[in-house]
Image (cartoon, rainbow, N blue to C red):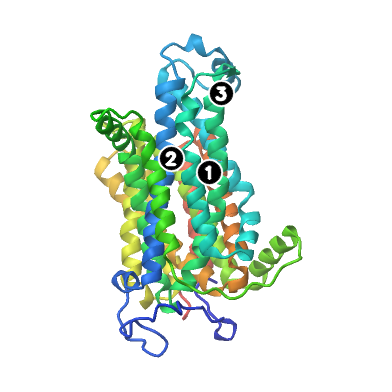
Amino acid sequence: MVGDHDPANEHIVSGPPLNSPDPALPTSANPEGRRGLQAVIHLDGFRRLWVGQIFSQLADKFYIVLMVYLIAQYWVTNTPDSNGALAEIASAIRMDFETRAQRITLLATGIYVANTIPAMVLGSVAGVWVDRWPKRRVMVASNGLRALLVLCTPLFLIPGPHWFGLSWGYWALLLMTFLESVLTQFFAPAEQATIPLLVPREHLLAANSLYQATSMGATIVGFALGDPILRGLNHLLQTVGINGGEFLLLPFCYGMAAISLSTIQMREPPRKDSRDSVWKEIVAGIKVLREQTSVRGAMVHLVVLYSLLAALYVLAISLASAIQGLGPTGFGTLLAMSGLGMAVGAVLVAQMGHRFSRRRLAAAGLGTITWCLVMLGQLRGNLSITLTLCGVLGIGAALVAIPAQTTIQEDTPESQRGRVFGLQNNLINIALSLPLVLAGALVSSIGLIPVLWVLAALSLTAALWERPWERC
């Protein structure tokens, strides 16, 4: 289970040899040192990694916003007749194609698919190579190459041939998005595997809490402010006679991430040249899950959690529809509230999580999610209550996600972290994708409340599986 740690199986987590830890920080020799967010931010190497994460996370969110902005500006006309090929595609997948917004949604779906495919199939392969290469170089190179890729974006607006009724530039955007996502699959496991190299074991919970809070903040800022920021840059530079200001934001963010990451000083254990095939090393990563029960349990928690959250993305539309004055298009407000709850929960875990066992934190989080799902069905229609429940659900999600991520970092052998985190990315992206399809179909066939009850039962089962009533 996630909270059960056998000291005999614990491996030594390499601290930052080039950055002497603050004597006030808690260690095995000084367990009473200070903890929490302020403590981990004082670790120089981790602070540089965290700054790189901020810029990289913002860039990922701004990327999606920019793609939708370009689609709306350049590839969707005001009349559906001029996009006959799109109309045929929409008809084939039974999607409405009457309004401009629906046509933008169809083309944006292509961007989402191009971004998702590498995340679902390449994570494990990328993780193997992350274990073979220096992690800092992987992180710097992935952000630097993404910065160079997005510099090509203005070229795609040049008039040219049309394929399947669309300009070549749209297809070029799909290819660029695919390549961007491929590079992200290398960055993500390298980043996760670097955290235990820079942070003492006693601070991993706080470090992951800060990462979770930052990720939620980047999501809210990126999606909420991405469009006005892009338009503001465009307008600002036009006042001095420069067009295309919106294309500068992504190279700047990815570039700043690369610069911050390049300044990290850390020593990694020497790598032996591996002659094993990639597939054999992927199997070795799976073997870690089979042999390390704590890692396997933590991975199950993450898969269950992200499946629940993905289903909530779909159910939020139905929940918002029942609220007078909000309506189905206001579902983003509910999701933003759950994101805010996750950020608040991350801060709570960082400051107080070390006082509780991982098993009880996970059980408390899953129990909180269960209660919120039941209450959302019973009290739907009330805006303030629904927003509050979404926020509390986000807090519960943080209680599950952060201890699980910390356990995987602690209990995975250093030489296997890349492939394990790559496998984790595969599983999480599958967990995010399948419920998006199934939840909508289930709501249409059996209704919202039965689906909420099914999800609550799944969450409750996972909570009881942790046996929180036992002494840890």
Task: Tell me, yes or no, whether the two marked residues, 1 and 3, touch with CB atoms within 8 Å.
Answer: no
As drawn, is 125 to the left or to the right of 313?
right
Tell me which numbered mark, 3 or 2, is placed earlier along the sequence. Answer: 2
Amino acid at circle 1: Glu
Which residue appears at 52% of the width and 14% of the height?
Answer: 83
Could you tell me residue 268's position as x and y percent?
55, 73
Tell me which numbered mark, 1 or 3, is placed earlier along the sequence. Answer: 3
Mark 2 → mark 1, Cα distance in angstroms: 10 Å
Q: Can I make out residue 293 in this image?
A: yes
Could you tell me residue 150's position as x and y percent?
47, 39
Crowdedness of circle 3 by 10 Å Cα count: few (<14), some, many (20+)? some
As drawn, is 417 to the left or to the right of 359?
right
As drawn, is 304 to the left or to the right of 232?
right
Amino acid at circle 2: Tyr
According to the image, label 1 marks what residue? 180
Which residue appears at 63% of the width and 50% of the height?
Answer: 122
Which residue appears at 69% of the width and 68% of the height?
Answer: 287
According to the image, label 2 marks what residue? 63
Q: Is residue 323 above or below residue 11?
A: above
Q: Can I make out residue 367 in this image?
A: no
Crowdedness of circle 2 by 10 Å Cα count: few (<14), some, many (20+)? many
Tell me the quadrant of the picture where the N terminus can be found.
bottom right
Q: Residue furthest bottom?
A: 29
Could you tell me residue 235's position as x and y percent?
26, 30
Taking depth in this image into account, of 132 and 318 the one nearest to the observer is 132
According to the image, label 3 marks what residue? 168
Crowdedness of circle 1 by 10 Å Cα count: few (<14), some, many (20+)? many
Which residue appears at 54% of the width and 45% of the height?
Answer: 181
